[in-house]
Image (tube, rainbow, N blue to C red):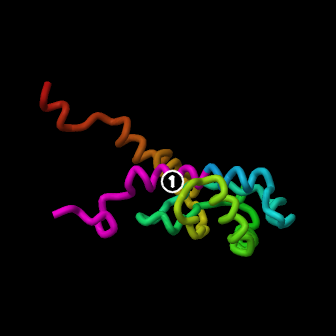
Amino acid sequence: MAKNRFHEGSGPSQRQLRVGELIRRTLADVLNRGDVHDPELNRLSITVGEVRVSPDLKVATAYVVPLGGKQEGNMFELLERNKAELRRAVSKELTLKYAPDLRFRLDETFDRLDETRRLFSQESVRRDIEGQDPDEDDDA
């Protein structure tokens, strides 16, 4: 029996990853060029970190963060207000059967990266990383 990819927890397919990256680049270009007819949104500098696409390619979740981490709430309000225009601009660049519905979420990758750096800088963690595994001494 064939596996059903819609209910399988194996992660995104190659097609989902490829389409997600194309949408990310296109969305970043549209926001960078200021192709949206909203001067408030064009004033913001927004980083599109990642785009995850549903298995049927009809929903694209864009993980965004404002440059400098400021005006978070305002950014989501502006993106939601201009969602239709952004969707149209993305679909014009891509050759998909359906234009995916865009959803915007805060990209917390940078926060997790800072937390990871903080953990690695702790003396006890650094000692564990740099230290030799006790099992290696027995092999000699």
Residue 40, relative to residue 125: is it above or below? below
Whether 8 is among the magenta residues is yes
Which quadrant holds residue 71?
A: bottom right
Q: Which residues are magenta?
A: 1-24
Left of 117 or right of it: where is 33?
A: right
Q: Amino acid at mark 1?
A: Val
Q: Please give the name of the residue rendered at 63% of the width and 60% of the height, measured from the top-left corner.
A: 91
Front-lying residue, 45 or 34: 34
x, y percentage for residue 39? 86, 64
Q: Report if residue 95 is visible in the image.
A: yes
Farthest residue to the left: give it.
139
x, y percentage for residue 17? 46, 52
Name the secondary structure under disc 1.
helix
x, y percentage for residue 82? 74, 70
Q: Please give the name of the residue rendered at 80% of the width and 64% of the height, measured from the top-left corner.
A: 41
x, y percentage for residue 20? 52, 55
Whether 115 is among the magenta residues is no
Left of 14 or right of it: where is 29?
A: right
Front-lying residue, 97 or 75: 97
The C terminus, quarter of image = top left
Residue hosting label 1: 19
Which quadrant holds residue 23?
A: bottom right
The image shows a total of numbered marks equal to 1
Residue 18, relative to residue 131: is it above or below? below
Q: Please give the name of the residue rendered at 84% of the width and 59% of the height, measured from the top-left corner.
A: 43
Q: Report if residue 68 is visible in the image.
A: no
